[in-house]
Amino acid sequence: MRPEEPNKTVTSLEQVQKRLKWKKLFAKKWFFPAIYLVTAALILTIAWLYQEHGSRVTETNKPIPASLPKEKVPANPTDDDMVLPMAKNSGAVKTMDFYDEAKSKKDREAALVDYANAFWPHAGIDFARKDGKSFEVVAALEGKVIRVEEHPVLGHQIEIKHESGISTVYQSLDDIRVKQGQMVKKGQVIGKAGRNLFEKEAGVHLHFEVRGRDQQAVHPAQYLPQTKQ
């Protein structure tokens, strides 16, 4: 017998044993039902994965809108005009306008404030009486008082936040009558006109501003009556 023959015999015995094991396994009653269940489960799993992948591809292929819808910003918080920021029959008139680059050179020069050896663009509208007397200042629109302070240059000032996100600012005040956190109504008296250092030459007056959501001053004329654009 050749040296490799015993190895062939061993290999053939192993094969016979494996075949006997498989025959015994096939003879079990539960074998084929188990195979069927496993196969069915695999098929269902593959089908589910395919369907899920297909739905994701469909969603991915949906057209993307060119731009997101933009939020509509109301003209003012209550869709109602502001009132002039001084009491009725106060006798106050506009004495200085908002600095507008689109206006003429003469109008731009008239809207510059001379302070500390420099000229500053006027960020609001000033109101004063011709006789130089004080007058009552009112809230131009309903809102919440978010700031009441005494500024060393701008004088006593009040800021009121409104529903749409804009705010109104009242500077150069005297006799403050509201507190921070207080809700005020349109036309409610919040103080009186006074003086400040920034516009010292203006004497007793009210400096009134409207600020957008970004806190940048905008022309009050687009909100106020009589001066509405």
Image: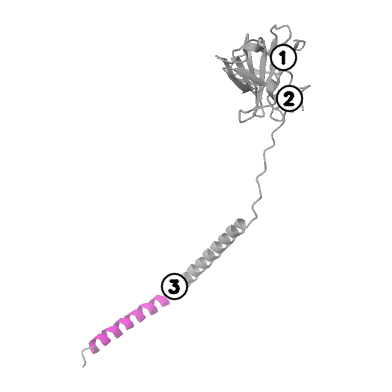
Q: Which residue is mark 1?
A: 86
Q: Which residue is mark 3?
A: 31
The residue mark sitting in front, 2 or 1, is 2
Q: Report x, y in % for residue 25.
A: 39, 75
- Badge 2 element: helix
Q: Which residue is mark 2?
A: 221
**Label 3: how many Cα within 10 Å (few below 14, some 14–19, many 20+):** few
The answer to whether residue 17 is above or below residue 80 is below
- Badge 3 element: helix
Residue at the image point whose x is 74% and y is 28% from the top: 79
Dominant secondary structure of the magenta stretch? helix
Tell me the CA gap for discs 2 and 3. Answer: 89 Å
What is the quadrant of residue 63 in the picture?
bottom right
Residue at the image point whose x is 67% and y is 29% from the top: 164
**Label 1: how many Cα within 10 Å (few below 14, some 14–19, many 20+):** many
The residue mark sitting in front, 2 or 3, is 2
Q: Is residue 142 visible?
A: no
Tell me the CA gap for discs 1 and 3. Answer: 95 Å
Residue stretch rendered in magenta on the structure: 5-27
* Disc nearer the start of the sequence (2/3): 3
Q: Report x, y in % for residue 42.
A: 50, 67
Residue type (three-letter) at the residue carrying disc 2: Ala
Residue type (three-letter) at the residue carrying disc 1: Met
* Disc nearer the start of the sequence (1/3): 3
The residue mark sitting in front, 1 or 3, is 1
